[in-house]
Structure formats: C-alpha cells, structure tokens
C-alpha cells in the first residue's frame, strides 16, 4: 500500500480492484458506506469521496431506494475507448453540446427541490475544493451528471452516464489547460457552475442554455487549441 497516497485514493483503488476481479459484479450492490468505513478503518467521508470518483467515471450508480451499485457497463467503462485523436475529441465535444445544452434547459423547467438541493451541495463542495484540482474535477463531472438527473428524463441521464468516463478526461484536461495558461482561475470556473445553478433555480431555460453553451464552447476552444499546437501528442491524454 502506497503510504504517499491519500486515504480516498487508496479506497478508490481498492473498490476498482473489487469490481475488476468480479468480487462485486455489475448490477450488484456494494456494502454500506458505514461497513466499508469500518472495514478499511477510515471515515465515512473518505468512502463517500472514493465512491464519488467512481460514480464520476461511470463505474457506480446510486439507485432509487438507496444503495450504491456497480453499473452494468462498469467493465466496459474501465476499458473505455480512449480519446486518441482530434476527430475523437471533436465528436465527444459535439455530443456533449447536444446533450448538455438540452439537458440544462429541461432541468430548468423540471427540476425538483431535491434536485436543487443536490446541485447546491455539489456547488458547495466545488467551492470548498478550490485549490484541490483532483477533487474539483470529480465535483465538476458530478455537477453535469446531476443536471441530467434533474431533467426527470431517465434516458437522458443514462446517456450522460454512458459518456461520463470520457467526460472526466475532457474536464480534467480542459481545466488543466485553463489553469496552466491562466486564462481562467479556479474561482472563475466555480462561478460559472454557480451561475448555471442559479439559472436552474430560477427556472430560466434560456439563460441556463446560454451559460452551458458558453461554458462548453470554452472547453472546446481549450482542447482543440491544444491539439493544434506543434508537437502535440496524437493522444489527447
């Protein structure tokens, strides 16, 4: 066990191993957070953080009625297709634009109080995580997945979850490019997500869609611009 790793990273890797070796199979339920915390001798918040990472990567899901389950597509997600070239990246950006602009419009129209509470909690966690890019990226993915959930359209939610592993890569890479180039600050990225939350709260689909469209356009410019630079590797990763 690598003592240099944070506790949640160790638990994340252990849960990945359990899924990959089939100890908990796709469709099966994980043991409770409380039991895992006792088993691994860590706090429940550490287990929740590890689960958040794996949910953001499309390996786990929380089902109505409680409990965390291994997604049916988990093994495929673990071997998810890589974003290998500019064409792959362009296609993913197009899919994200189509799904997410439409999703946030529907979320603004149909969100419930429970959805607002979940989105508000994620935005609060994003603010707390400013300065910690690794966990900020997870909250970023979870925010976009929660918007899909707030549409009240299970098919849209499933479609978003199916690309969450690739989304995690583009979110990670775009944030790194923004922050490295100082075109964006971590606080500004947080503010963009808070503005989207407020548009959803105010049930303003036009404003919500405009904010998401602007956000995704910036993602595209950052990533496609990086892929255009001389010497850029063939793999976006």
Image (cartoon, grey):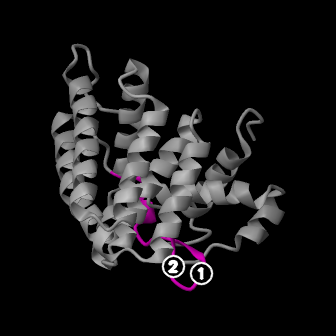
What's the CA distance linking mark 1 and mark 2?
A: 6 Å
SS class of the residue under badge 1? loop
Residues at circles 1 and 2 in contact by the CB criterion of under 8 Å: yes
Depth check: 20 or 209 in front?
209
SS class of the residue under badge 2? loop
Asked if residue 126 lies left or right of residue 102, the reply is: right
The local crowd at label 2, few if under 14, some if 14 to 19, many if 20 or more residues have their Cα within 10 Å, is: few
Residue plotted at (34% across, 49% down) = 166
Q: Can residue 17 be seen by looking at this rendering?
A: no
Would you place residue 175 above or below residue 88 in this image?
Answer: above
In the rendered image, which residue does mark 1 sit on?
66
Q: Can residue 34 be seen by looking at this rendering?
A: yes
**Residue 42, x across and y down, in percent:** 80, 55
Depth check: 225 or 191 in front?
191
Residue plotted at (38% across, 19% down) = 181
Task: Specify start and end residues of the magenta stretch as a single range.
Answer: 60-80
In the rendered image, which residue does mark 2 sit on?
63
Q: Is residue 93 magenta?
A: no
């Amino acid at each position: 066990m690598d003592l240099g790793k944070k506790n949640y990273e160790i638990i994340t890797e252990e849960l990945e191993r359990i899924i990959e070796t089939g100890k908990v199979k796709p469709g099966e339920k994980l043991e409770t957070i409380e039991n895992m915390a006792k088993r691994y001798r860590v706090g429940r918040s550490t287990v929740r953080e590890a689960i958040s990472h794996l949910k953001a990567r499309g390996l786990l899901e929380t089902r109505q009625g409680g409990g965390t389950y291994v997604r049916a597509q988990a093994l495929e997600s673990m071997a998810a297709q890589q974003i290998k070239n500019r064409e792959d990246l362009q296609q993913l950006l197009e899919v994200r634009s189509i799904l997410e602009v439409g999703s946030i419009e529907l979320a603004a129209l149909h969100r419930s109080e429970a959805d607002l509470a979940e989105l508000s909690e994620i935005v609060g966690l994003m603010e707390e995580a400013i300065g910690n890019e690794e966990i900020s990226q997870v909250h970023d993915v979870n925010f976009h997945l929660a918007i899909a959930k707030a549409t009240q359209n299970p098919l849209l939610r499933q479609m978003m979850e199916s690309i969450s592993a690739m989304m995690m890569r583009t979110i990670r890479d775009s944030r790194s490019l923004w922050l490295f180039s100082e075109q964006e600050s971590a606080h500004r990225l947080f503010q963009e997500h808070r503005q989207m939350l407020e548009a959803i709260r105010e049930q303003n689909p036009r404003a919500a869609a405009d904010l998401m469209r602007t956000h995704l356009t910036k993602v595209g410019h950052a990533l496609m611009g990086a892929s255009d630079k001389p010497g850029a590797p063939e793999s976006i990763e």
